[in-house]
Amino acid sequence: MKAILYAVIAVFALIIGAAAGAVGGYQWFQRESRLKLNSADARARHIVDEALREAEAKKKEAILEAKEEVHKLRTDFERELKERRAEIQRLERRVVQKEEQLDRKVEALERKEEALNRKERELDRKNQQAQELVNKQMAELERISQLTMEEARELFLKQVEQEARADAAKLIREIDAEARENAEKRARELVGMAVQRVAADHSSELTVTVVSLPNDEMKGRIIGREGRNIRTLETLTGIDLIIDDTPEAVVLSGFDPVRREVAKIALQKLIQDGRIHPARIEEMVEKAQKEVEARIREEGDAACFELGIHNLHPELVKLLGRLKFRTSYGQNVLKHSVEVAHLAGVMAAELGVNVEVAKRAGLLHDIGKAVDHELEGSHVAIGVSLLRRYKEHPDVIHAMECHHGDVEPRSVEAHLVTAADAISAARPGARRETLEAYIKRLEKLEALADSSDGVEKSYAIQAGREIRVMVKPDRIDDYAAMKLTKEIARKIEDELEYPGQIRVVVVRETRAVEYAR
C-alpha cells in the first residue's frame, strides 16, 4: 500500500512540476517576445530617423543645385539680352546712317533733275531753232528743185529699191544657178555610178499560177472520186484549184504566194508520181512545205550573204526569203530589195555616211510585204512593227519608215533609201504597170475627190499613195472637213482598185490679206 501511495504521490509531484514549468516557460517566452519587439521598434525608429535626416539633406542639396542653376540661367539670359541690345543699337545706328545717306542722295538727285530740266529746256530751244533753220533750207531746196519733200523721199526710195531688187535678183540667180549646177551634177554622178555598179541582168518575173498537165485525163484524177482529191488538196494548201475547159492546164488561185508555191510544187510532184489519193496528197503537201521553207531560208541567207549583212534576226531572214514569192507590179520584191540595198550602199559610200545602215534599211524597206496579206495596215507600218519587235537599230527603222514619204526624213541614209527605191522601181522593164495606166489611175483618183461638194482642187501625190484635197473655207468648216475626209476615203475604197493604202488629207485654209500704206 505504501508503495502505491508513494507512486501516486510521485505522479502528482511530476504533474505539478510540469505545470509549474509550463507556466514559467510561457512567462519567459512572453518576456523574450516583449524584449524583441521593443528592440525592433527601436531599430525601426532609428531607421526612420536616419531616412528623414538623409531626405532632409538631399532636399537641401537639390534646393541648392536648383538655386545655382537658376542663377546660371539668369546670368546667361542677362548676358544674351545685353548682347541683343547692343546688336539692336548697332543696327539702329546703321539705319540712321543709311537714312542720312539716302537723304543726301535724294538731294543730289533733285539737283541733277533740276540741271537736266534746264538742259532740256535749252535743247528744246535749240531744236526749235534748228527746225526753223531746216524748214528754211527745205523751202529753199523745194524752190530750187521744184519738188516737195514727200516727192523727193519717194523718188529716192524708189531708186534705192530698184537698185536693191536688181542686186538681189542677180545674186539669187547666180546662187541658184551654181547650186543647181553642182547639185544636179553630183546627183547624176551618184545615181549613174550606183546604177552602173548595180546593173542587173534579170527581167521582171511573174508569179506562176498555171500548172501544165500531161493530158486532160489528169484533170479527172486530180478531182478524184466525188471530188475527194481536190477537196483534200485545197484544204491542206488553202489554195483554190480552178479546173475548167482550158486544155492541159490547172489554175491555182490564192492570195498567199507561199501557199500558192506549195500547192504548185505538191501538184507537180503528184502529177509526176501518178498516184493521186488523199493520203498521197497529204504526204506530197508536207514535202512541198518543207521544200518551200528550205528555199525561203536559202533565199534569205543568200540575200544577206550577197550584201554582207550579218547578225540579222532569223525571223527577218525568213521573211526576206518569203519575198522571193512576192511581186509588186510584176517586179520580184526580194530582188528589188537587194537592188535597193546595193544602190543605197553605193551612194552612202560615196557620200561618206553609214553604209551598213543604208544597206540594211534598203534590204528591209519592203519587209512588211511578206505578211501584209495577213496583218492590217500598210506594208510600211507592218515593217516598222516587225523591225521594232526584232530589235533593229532606230536609224534603220527610221530610214525604212521614210521610203514612201509617210515620215519626214531626218538622216542622209533615209534620203538614200528613198532615192534607191525610186531608181529600182523606175528601171526600164522592172514593173509592168504602163505609164498610161498610172496616169489614168491618178486622174481617176483626183476626179473622185473633185466630185465631192465644197472641194476646190485636189492633187494626187506620192505616186498615188496620197490625195491632198483643198476645200473652200467659206463652205466647209473644220467638222465638215473631217467628215469629208471619211467620205472621200469611203468612195476610194468602193470605186477604185489600188495597191496598198491611200492617205486622204483635207486642207482648209483661210487667208486674210491687207496692205499697210
Image (cartoon, helix red, strand yellow):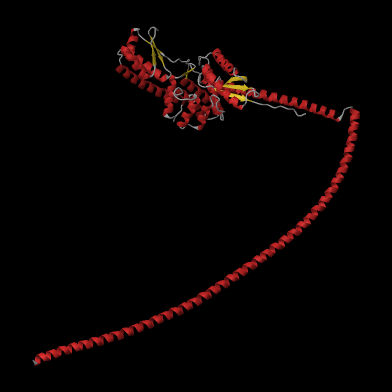
Q: Relative to residue 118, is residue 288 drawn left or right?
A: left
- Residue projecting furthest to the bottom: 2
Count of marks placed on residues: 0
- Work out whether 129 lies above or below 207: below
**Residue 34 appears in which quarter of the rendering?**
bottom left
Q: Position of residue 70 (x, y in %)?
A: 56, 72
Q: Quadrant of the N terminus?
A: bottom left
Q: Residue at x 84, y 29 (%)?
A: 150
**Residue 183 appears in which quarter of the rendering?**
top right
Q: Position of residue 368 (x, y in %)?
A: 47, 25
Q: Relative to residue 257, is residue 477 drawn left or right?
A: right
- Residue projecting furthest to the left: 1
Q: Position of residue 157 (x, y in %)?
A: 80, 28
Q: Nearer the viewer, residue 471 or 125?
A: 471
Q: Nearer the viewer, residue 372 or 306?
A: 372
Q: Relative to residue 115, is residue 390 drawn left or right?
A: left
**Residue 153 at least partly seen:** yes
Q: Residue at x 25, y 87 (%)?
A: 23
- Work out whether 487 lies above or below 94: above
**Residue 350 at least partly seen:** no
Q: Quadrant of the C terminus?
A: top right
Q: Nearer the viewer, residue 461 or 198?
A: 461
Q: Residue at x 86, y 30 (%)?
A: 149
**Residue 208 appears in which quarter of the rendering?**
top left
- Work out whether 247 lies above or below 77: above
Q: Position of residue 453 (x, y in %)?
A: 61, 19
